[in-house]
Amino acid sequence: MSSISHADHNAAEGAERDVRRQHQHHTSHAAVAPGEIAVGVVIGRASEYFDFFTYGIASVLVFPSVFFPFLSQLDGILLAFTIFSFAFIARPIGTTLFMAIQRTWSRGTKLTAALFLLGTSTVCMAFLPANTTHGYTVIVILAVLRFLQGIALGGSWDGLPSLLSLNAPKHRRGWYAMLGQLGAPTGFLIAASLFLFLNTQLSREDFLDWGWRYPFFVAFAINVVALFARLRLVVTEEYTQMMEEGQLEPIGIIEMVRAQGYNLFIGAFAALASYALFHIVTIFPLSWISLTRSQDINNVLIVQIVGALVAILATVASGVIADKVGRRNTLGTMAVLIGLFAIASPWLLGGGKLAQDAFLVIGFALLGLSYGQASGTVTANFAKRFRYTGAALTSDFAWLIGAAFAPLVALGLSHRFGLGAVSVYLLSGVACTLLALRINRALETDKNKA
């Protein structure tokens, strides 16, 4: 990935020219409408989350049996969760690398290369053979592909959420901020539904032999659709003009850290409670219930699908709430509620089927309400020319700190010390969020006084 071939570059530029020509024909240089941007944001984010949730669900249902048969089920899941974290470690690297690619070539080249890499690395997992020889070659390849997923996801940042924020009416910024976040529950809903269908329609042997591979194939097709939906916007003259005016500029990471490092730090921690909760209600419960065999895993997927629908509604509601009380107040209030949920988590997840189902549905509702405003709450503090890169890196570091190791840490500690460890993990995220929001408010007060 250190360079892009001349053929790939020409192909990307050709696609970019075709999309721009088509857009000019239909819009006659009309301004980029927030609603149109929102569609591109939702489609783009949903495709990315589908890739990640496909791997996450397979980490529990498939990989321990297919790739780590020489380990116990617990150790197999823990190893899968370790590799799961590699993508989040790679995301800031991918952002840095592809920002350089954009500065050298173009946004179209960057986005095409990133989504091609994301789709390819995901679909290549479907071709990995079962690890029947108990060797390490397949495991190493899986780890490399997972790392490449993270590189690609970092590179797929198109700046559309930042553009949406800049074009949103001031009194509706909370509403438009939540639109991009709808991609998360939507991506999970599609991935969980697909795995549920395959797991219920196929025998266990067929599912582990070939059935689990289909979601990885689907991911590539979804990425192709998402690519054109986003290229249609990012190559428009209006978007290009905004970039050239310095409002959305691909800044180098060294310059970014020197000039706005404090905003990166605060932004990464401001939504940590939401990011910590993210995998605690999506991936971790699958592993815990699978190990304890407290209920059928297909029933868990059904409840999680219902939870994803609840999260979509809650995400929409977060936009309405944030426009009434403010995004920062919304995020702080949700952090407190997540803290209360964390305290109750051991009794819910460690209880019977009804209690576990309540854990999932309540968790998804809180996730939607909090994650709906997790993007852009403090990134508005960035100077305009730093907002494009700053928003990308803030998200990268928030995922790395808050969510990358959540399934691994939660499962490992809860197995050793009990479910109280999950409470401690979530409460630490809550504390970081409240502290970061307080520091951010103090900085803004000092700035206004100056």
Image: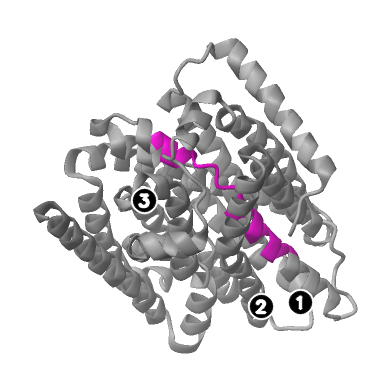
Residue 157 against residue 228 in the figure, above or below: below
Quadrant where the C terminus sits is bottom left
As drawn, the residue found furthest toward the right would be: 133
Amino acid at dot 2: Leu
Q: Which residue is mark 1?
A: 68
Contact (CB < 8 A) between labels 2 and 1? yes
Q: Position of residue 117 (x, y in %)?
A: 73, 51
Mark-to-mark CA distance, 2 and 1: 8 Å
> In the shown orientation, is residue 181 left or right of residue 1?
left
Q: Is residue 309 visible?
A: no
* Left or right, 32 with reference to 60: left
Give the percent coordinates (x, y) of residue 368. Answer: 38, 49
Q: Nearer the viewer, mark 2 or mark 1?
A: 2
Give the CA distance from mark 3 to mark 1: 34 Å
Quadrant in the picture for the N terminus: bottom right
Q: Which residue is disc 3 drawn over?
A: 365
